[in-house]
Image (cartoon, rainbow, N blue to C red):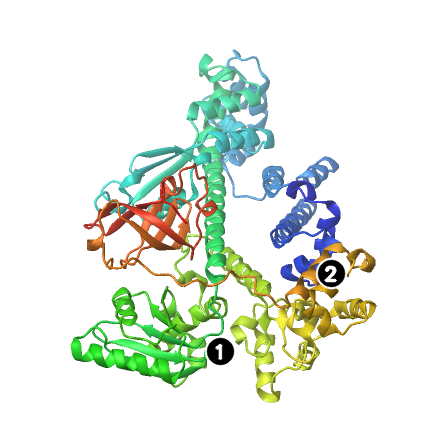
């Protein structure tokens, strides 16, 4: 595993041991750097995944050995081959000839006594007469019909079935043809006859051909979706002649171009090889390749989704600022809510800013009154229907000086408003209030609010409904956990949904923490967490460094793990100062020589982390917040003209480009070829969800509602 992952053996071994002890990936990466050699979360996760695959292989290996032994088939040579298989595919190739299976054509031929003929055809001179070789194997009249070989034509046919199956079950031949499929297979897609009009969405793929190994993930997933919906027929195979030539060369027989006569032994062997390729090998290997290609494409799609999700939930928060949030609407008006700096709902009502002069004046007056009464510092406006128009109204409503107005991506707010989480938080309020609160809170702290929503509802994925859902869920959960633990969580204010992603906690302990603080008041120290029911020493070890408690000990609000408190106390004692002074004064920390504190289990990586944390206890790693404004006078596609340069916000990144919100209620696409003046292989190299960019309008297709954008030659400063 270490060699495959290009990681040190000692680090891989340490990660394996820690995982087996129940340690989490964030804990291992943050607090066990000396043991692992400072492997990061990505590397630790890679070790975890490789370990799971290795154990899955060992489990399958044990099952194969047990099956062979039970049926009396296990020999020392076969046992060695099973033990030497380094992949699941190699193991299944070894096991294939011995796997219990239904009665095949070859098995029926063996029962009729044709195995010797098959061997004779294989080993005879190429020009040997096949009927002559077959003659001794013809059975007399009156033989059981199941076992009869009536003539010299039936005998070679049965022998060919045996040769074809033997060829298909040969690990070397199967491996050679599999390699050809991987390297040279061509994916061919065509329309299902009679479905051309109904499947017009997939017209780009009618008659499409492309080398499978080089196919981008999004293109493959699109074609597979078309096939699944019944509009496309998709095959993935190399050239038939290349496949047959590969089998001949590997089997050591004459090349197919020599065309031996059918009545010769060589002709019979060639027919058997052709049958093995067409009937047994090609369908099986095509299924294998399709599975591998789909899994690779799904892994890439999941990776894109995970990267987008990380950017989205790690978006900079404006901090604890009092907020007014608006969920815009035309006919039904805009739902208005006021929140305090902790996100607590203070007030809600409906205003009608877009329904005429009287309604607009009342709405403006309500906005001003709410801003004054609740000391509002930021107004968050949802970017859905009527969002831009409502934002423009708010900016001109005469709000108090210093109040920022921010348009907020409200994707998923409706999902939250109808969820069990929302009903628990606001049992006495309807969906509209909950949705407006979610809009305000997701601006206030994207991480804390977005963890309450299924990530698949946030609109930052690529074919997320086509990929393996358990794998997607796991990847997204790990991204959320990574972000939550990187930022840290206030144990006295966090929701159960946020706490559940803290290392070592989970949903049950999260609910117990919330219940304990509700009953007993806020935690005064990290040690108080040990009083929470079912939160034992192991869970405390995993979680404590990521939970913040603002109480008597300033280290409790930092990322310094409690197991290192004595070390920090020793540093303060050596300097003759109080712990609070050590955190407050740069000059004191500058006198610390980390190498003096290296000891068993504590090395320079941990000491460096501790000193950095002492310099900024609990520092938020997210970037600073900056308000964003769309271009004035641009509210719909009708306002766009080619050549316009506009500010925008990236909403989604895919393998083929990025979608950008320019404030016209429809995201425009920047194709990967238009992202930069230089060649871009991966759009994530240039853009990420939530980033502000400047784009040029290239084309506006009003009929299909599509906007093409470009960033080439556009100054991004």
Image disc number at residue 342:
1
Q: Is residue 82 above or below residue 141?
A: below
> Looking at the image, which residue sits at the far top?
127
Instruction: Please indicate, yes or no, whether residue 418 appears anywhere in the rendered image.
Output: no
Q: Is residue 477 left or right of residue 523?
A: left
| Residue at left offset 31%, top offset 39% | 205
Which mark sits nearer the N-terminus, 2 or 1? 1
Q: Nearer the viewer, residue 213 or 625?
A: 625
Image disc number at residue 590:
2
Q: Is residue 569 left or right of residue 705?
A: right
Q: Nearer the viewer, residue 319 or 2?
A: 319
* Quarter where residue 79 is shown: top right
* Quarter where residue 419 is shown: bottom left
Q: Is residue 656 above or below residue 509?
A: above
Q: Quadrant of the N terminus?
A: top right
The answer to whether mark 2 and mark 1 are in CB contact below 8 A is no
| Residue 669 place in picture, x, y as percent | 33, 48
| Residue 610 place in picture, x, y as percent | 71, 62
Q: Is residue 280 left or right of residue 516?
A: left
Which of discs 2 and 1 lies nearer the camera? The answer is: 2
Q: Give SS at disc 1.
A: loop
Q: Is residue 610 left or right of residue 309?
A: right
| Residue 240 place in picture, x, y as percent | 42, 26
| Residue at left offset 46%, top offset 60% | 312
């Amino acid at each position: 595993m270490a060699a495959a992952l290009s990681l040190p053996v000692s680090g891989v071994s340490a990660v394996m041991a820690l995982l087996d002890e129940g340690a989490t990936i964030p804990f291992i990466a943050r607090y066990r750097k000396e043991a692992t050699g400072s492997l990061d979360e990505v590397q630790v996760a890679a070790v975890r995944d490789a370990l799971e695959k290795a154990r899955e292989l060992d489990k399958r290996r044990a099952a194969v050995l047990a099956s062979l032994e039970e049926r009396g088939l296990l020999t020392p040579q076969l046992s060695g081959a099973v033990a030497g298989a380094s992949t699941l595919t190699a193991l299944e190739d070894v096991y294939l000839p011995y796997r219990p299976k239904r009665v095949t054509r070859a098995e029926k031929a063996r029962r009729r006594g044709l195995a010797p003929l098959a061997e004779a055809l294989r080993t005879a001179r190429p020009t040997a007469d096949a009927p002559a070789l077959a003659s001794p194997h013809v059975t007399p009249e009156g033989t059981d019909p199941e076992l009869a070989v009536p003539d010299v034509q039936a005998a070679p046919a049965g022998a060919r079935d045996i040769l074809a199956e033997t060829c298909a079950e040969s690990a070397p031949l199967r491996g050679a043809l599999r390699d050809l499929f991987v390297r040279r297979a061509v994916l061919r897609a065509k329309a299902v006859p009679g479905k051309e009009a109904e499947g017009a969405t997939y017209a780009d793929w009618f008659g499409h051909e492309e080398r499978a190994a080089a196919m981008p993930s999004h293109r493959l997933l699109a074609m597979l979706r078309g096939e699944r919906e019944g509009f496309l027929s998709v095959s993935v195979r190399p050239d038939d002649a290349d496949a047959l030539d590969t089998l001949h060369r590997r089997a050591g027989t004459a090349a197919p171009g020599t065309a031996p006569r059918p009545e010769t032994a060589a002709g019979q062997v060639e027919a058997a090889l052709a049958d093995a390729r067409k009937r047994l090998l090609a369908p099986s290997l095509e299924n294998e390749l399709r599975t591998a290609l789909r899994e690779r494409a799904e892994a890439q799609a999941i990776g894109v989704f995970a990267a987008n999700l990380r950017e989205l939930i790690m978006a900079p928060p404006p901090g604890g600022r009092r907020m007014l949030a608006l969920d815009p609407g035309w006919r039904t008006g805009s739902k208005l809510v006021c929140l305090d700096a902790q996100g607590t709902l203070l007030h809600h009502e409906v205003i009608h800013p877009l329904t005429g002069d009287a309604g607009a004046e009342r709405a403006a007056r309500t906005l001003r009154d709410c801003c004054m009464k609740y000391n509002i510092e930021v107004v968050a406006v949802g970017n859905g229907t009527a969002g831009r128009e409502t934002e423009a109204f708010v900016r001109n409503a005469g709000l108090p000086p210093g109040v920022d107005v921010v348009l907020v991506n409200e994707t998923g707010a409706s999902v939250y408003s109808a969820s069990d989480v929302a009903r628990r938080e606001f049992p006495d309020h309807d969906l509209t209030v909950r949705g407006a609160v979610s809009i305000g809170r997701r601006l206030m702290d994207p991480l804390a609010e977005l963890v309450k929503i299924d990530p698949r509802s946030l609109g930052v994925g690529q074919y997320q409904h086509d990929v393996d859902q358990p794998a997607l869920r796991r990847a997204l959960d790990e991204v959320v956990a990574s972000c939550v633990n990187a930022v840290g969580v206030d144990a006295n204010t966090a929701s159960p949904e946020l706490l559940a992603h803290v290392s070592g906690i989970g949903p049950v302990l999260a609910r117990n923490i919330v219940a304990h603080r509700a009953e007993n008041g806020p935690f005064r120290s990290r040690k108080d967490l040990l009083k929470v029911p079912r939160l034992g020493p192991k869970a405390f070890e995993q979680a404590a460094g990521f939970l913040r408690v603002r109480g008597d000990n300033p280290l409790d609000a930092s990322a310094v793990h409690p197991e290192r408190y004595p070390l920090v106390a020793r540093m303060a004692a050596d300097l003759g100062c109080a712990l609070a002074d050590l955190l407050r004064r740069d000059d004191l920390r500058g006198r610390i020589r980390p190498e003096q504190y290296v000891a068993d289990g504590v090395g320079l990586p941990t000491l460096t982390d501790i000193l950095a944390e002492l310099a900024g206890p609990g520092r938020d790693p997210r970037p600073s917040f900056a308000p964003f404004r769309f271009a004035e006078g641009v509210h719909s596609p009708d306002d766009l003209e080619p050549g316009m340069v506009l500010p925008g916000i990236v909403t989604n990144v895919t393998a083929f480009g990025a979608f950008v919100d320019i404030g016209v209620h429809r995201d425009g696409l920047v194709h990967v070829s238009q992202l930069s003046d230089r060649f871009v292989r991966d759009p994530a190299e240039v853009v990420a969800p939530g980033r502000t960019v400047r784009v040029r309008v290239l084309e506006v297709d009003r009929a299909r509602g599509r906007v093409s954008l470009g960033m080439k030659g556009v100054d991004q400063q």
